[in-house]
Image (tube, rainbow, N blue to C red):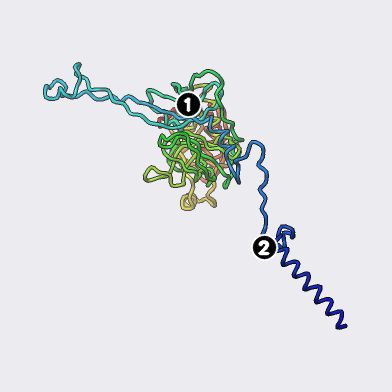
């Protein structure tokens, strides 16, 4: 037995000696797990045409959308009032030989999105409002003068057009209302005039309204950096498809604080199509002012719930007055569709073609009544 243990000890000693020699002089002969914790790393072969790509990148989305986003430069001539002292020799220094003050002008900048290959560009109405000259700079370096096709102050959207040879790179529209909270988005525009810029963020909220920016509000809120000059630019998804038109920021000092608002593509598309076809937007109107019901108002009208809208005023000779609607009525539904908030009522009426007759249910003195209203044309509004 002692002889066997002696042979075993000698074998182990020889094996350990050999292992020490190999580990010291030829470590590459050992398996990876035995190399004293040393691990060899291997880089994966780069994909064809993507040798510089590392990790997550939104380059493909940016490259798809950027050629469709343009910079817009506007100039407005400012009329200087005639000075009562223009004929006074002491003030002659400030006027030319004809006695007129030198013309002045103001300039501004913004962004726009090419929506068709023949040169139609969608932007904000406030970007081109009252502009005497509009110049568009494309991402490929070309510049051209543009003219306004039409605008809609109530959604702050406008369509302008440039005439350039060849087909322009038109943006691809995402499906209406495809955006979801938490989706990654890119904002593309020309902030502060530094040139075309891409910023990234997420969709922070949807259907933001009651902001006092436009009559019709249904904003996408995003934390992607949007600064002055981004107005009218594109908000795109990770596929480079348009989901909104950057319109406004919340900021006390003019810089981005991570609260930006974009007009959703559903609103932009409908408005754009009407402007291109007719030069303006036509909406339905009944001529009634409303207020959302609060628990206190519902209690004063002896209502058991706060569903519906209180009619606060009725415009004289309006479709609402002609149908028999009175101030103090509670609007319950339109064409059997329940109405519980002001924005739903406004959108429902606005999307109804003028001349169409709709059924309106109201509650008056505790009694439910159904009235017929012939929808009129909404008066044009100034921004």
Instruction: Please rate how many residues cluster around mark 1, counting C-alpha atoms within 10 Å: few if below 14, some from 14 to 19, many from 20.
Output: few
Q: Quadrant of the C terminus?
A: top left
- Judging by the rendered image, the residue that carries numbered circle 1 is 141
Q: Horizontally, is 32 left or right of 117 in the view? A: right
**Residue that protrudes farthest toward the bottom in the picture:** 2
Residue at (37% x, 46% y) in the render: 252
Where is residue 298 drawn, in percent x and y?
Answer: 49, 50
Q: Quadrant of the N terminus?
A: bottom right
Instruction: Please rate how many residues cluster around mark 2, counting C-alpha atoms within 10 Å: few if below 14, some from 14 to 19, many from 20.
Output: few
**Quick check: can you spot residue 364?**
no
Mark seen at residue 69:
none
SS at circle 1:
loop
Residue at (48% x, 45% y) in the render: 292
Above/below status of 308 relative to 41: above
Foreground: disc 1 or disc 2: 2
- Judging by the rendered image, the residue that carries numbered circle 2 is 37
Count up the numbered dots: 2
**Quick check: can you spot residue 234?**
yes
Please state which of residues 233 and 33 is positioned toward the viewer in this rendering.
33
Q: Horizontally, is 100 left or right of 379 in the view? A: left
**Residue that protrudes farthest toward the top in the picture:** 98
Where is residue 88 drawn, in percent x and y?
Answer: 12, 22
Q: Earlier in the sequence, mark 1 or mark 2?
A: 2
Please state which of residues 193 and 201 is positioned toward the viewer in this rendering.
193
Q: Horizontally, is 96 left or right of 340 in the view? A: left
Where is residue 207 drawn, in percent x and y?
Answer: 53, 43
Above/below status of 82 relative to 264: above
Residue at (72% x, 67% y) in the render: 20
Where is residue 126 drawn, in percent x and y?
Answer: 41, 32
**Residue that protrudes farthest toward the right in the picture:** 1
SS at circle 2:
loop
């Amino acid at each position: 037995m002692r002889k066997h243990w002696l042979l075993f000890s000698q074998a182990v000693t020889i094996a350990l000696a050999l292992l020490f020699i190999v580990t010291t002089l030829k470590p590459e002969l050992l398996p990876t797990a035995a190399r004293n914790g040393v691990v060899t790393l291997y880089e994966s072969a780069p994909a064809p045409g993507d040798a510089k790509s590392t990790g997550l990148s939104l380059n493909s989305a940016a490259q798809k959308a950027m050629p469709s986003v343009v910079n817009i430069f506007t100039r407005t001539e400012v009329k200087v009032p005639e000075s009562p002292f223009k004929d006074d020799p002491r003030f002659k220094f400030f006027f030319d030989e004809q006695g007129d003050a030198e013309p002045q002008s103001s300039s501004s900048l913004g962004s726009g999105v090419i929506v068709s290959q023949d040169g139609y560009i969608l932007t904000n109405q406030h970007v081109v409002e009252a502009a005497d000259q509009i110049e568009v700079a494309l991402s490929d370096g070309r510049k051209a003068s543009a003219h306004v096709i039409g605008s809609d102050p109530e959604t702050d959207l406008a369509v302008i057009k440039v005439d350039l040879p060849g087909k322009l790179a038109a943006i691809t529209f995402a499906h209406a209302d495809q955006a979801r909270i938490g989706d990654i988005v890119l904002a593309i525009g020309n902030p502060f005039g530094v040139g075309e810029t891409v910023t990234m963020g997420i969709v922070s909220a949807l259907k933001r309204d009651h902001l006092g920016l436009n009559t019709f509000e249904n904003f996408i809120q995003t934390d992607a950096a949007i600064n002055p000059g981004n107005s009218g630019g594109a908000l795109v998804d990770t596929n480079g498809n348009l989901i909104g038109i950057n319109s406004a920021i919340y900021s006390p000092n003019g810089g981005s604080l991570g609260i930006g608002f974009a007009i959703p593509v559903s609103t932009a598309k409908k408005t754009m199509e009407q402007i291109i076809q007719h030069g303006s937007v036509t909406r339905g109107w009944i001529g009634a002012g409303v207020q959302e019901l609060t628990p206190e108002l519902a209690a004063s009208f002896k209502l058991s719930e706060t569903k519906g809208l209180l009619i606060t005023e009725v415009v004289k000779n309006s479709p609402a007055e002609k149908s028999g609607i009175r101030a103090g009525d509670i609007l319950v539904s339109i064409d059997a569709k329940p109405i519980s908030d002001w924005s739903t009522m406004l959108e429902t009426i606005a999307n109804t073609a003028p001349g169409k007759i709709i059924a309106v249910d109201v509650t008056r003195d505790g009694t439910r009544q159904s009235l017929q209203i012939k929808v009129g044309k909404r008066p044009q509004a100034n921004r």
